[in-house]
Image: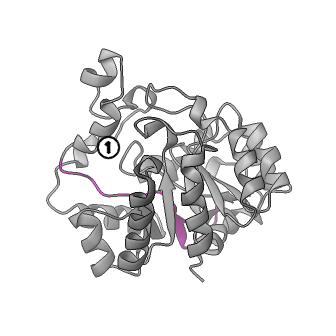
Amino acid sequence: MPMPSDVGIIDCMIGFPASDFSQYDFIRAQLMDEESKEGFDFPVEYMFKNVPKELYGTENPIDVTLHEMDRFGVERGLIGVGGDVSARALKEHPDRFVPSGNVDPNQGMEGIRDMVRQYEEYGVRAFGAFPAGCNPQVPINHAKFYPYYAKCVELDVPIFVCAGVPGPRLPMACQHVELIDQVMYDFPDLVFVTRHGCEPWEKLAMKLMLKWPNLYYSTSAFAPKYYPEEIVNYANTRGADKIIYAGYFPMGLSLERIMTDMPNVAFKDKVWPKFLRENAMKVLKLA
């Protein structure tokens, strides 16, 4: 069951070191406790050791990310669009970076028009959403989300949605995994990929993946040492086609930390290429 060294890894959550930590201001605006608002550069710093903060402020953020990808065999990475750095990365390295749009269901029809703009301008292969980070929060199965799910189906792209207890000290009810069940019922053609672990409802996530053909799970924001046991077991049995690798560089984890832990994950031989590459290729239509 060793991790193969000849698989070109697709990382479904990667980014670039920012100039500072202001990108998290939208989260800080909703936080109530002083430690989160004033004591952390990174709002979930209490959960992570050795956040690669030393990389922030670098003059060449794209080069930093490419260097780390090359060190650890990451062939391509899914990045958020928007901002000069991402735009330049997509233009200069289209073979290394895959564009992903962002949605905020509080924007109503203007947000739908922005989805179309991102799709047409960048050729996005997916969209992402953070229900607990919306202001106000929007539950996964709320009516505000439904036009966005419908547009994803129309554009034939997946949506990656944070599910489970959020890392920032924000209320969690809007991300309860059970809410996904109604969405999959109402949108059977929607390809829905969970982000950030689904804890403590990972067993429920597994049951829902058995139930719904287009529901997937990505491992973002987790060091491999802490992948939930239920998810590893599911991948090794009936879920080899459903579990997708996603990292968290440079937000909370270094690629070195991730890839140092990775060989110790107890995946079966047949699971590794699917987990590291093939499932992402299928969901993002990169073949």
Residue 46's image quarter?
Answer: top left
Q: Which residues are magenta?
A: 1-19
Left or right relative to 182: residue 172: left
Left or right relative to 154: residue 96: left
Vertical relation: 232 (above or below) 204 = below
Left or right relative to 145: residue 67: left
- The location of residue 230, given as percent across then percent down, is 76, 40
Q: Which residue is mark 1?
A: 52
Q: Quadrant of the C terminus?
A: bottom right
In magenta stretch: residue 9: yes
Q: Residue at x 77, y 66 (%)?
A: 270
Protein image colouring: one colour
Vertical relation: 40 (above or below) 65 = above
Which residue occupies the extreme left position in the image? 59
Residue 91's image quarter?
Answer: bottom left
Q: Residue at x 85, y 53 (%)?
A: 211
Q: Nearer the viewer, residue 102 or 4?
A: 102
Q: Nearer the viewer, residue 4 or 188?
A: 188
Q: Is residue 201 visible?
A: yes
Q: Residue at x 78, y 52 (%)?
A: 209
Q: Amino acid at mark 1?
A: Pro
Q: Nearer the viewer, residue 227 or 282?
A: 282
Name the element at disc 1: loop
- The location of residue 5, given as percent across then percent down, is 58, 68
Q: Quadrant of the N terminus?
A: bottom right
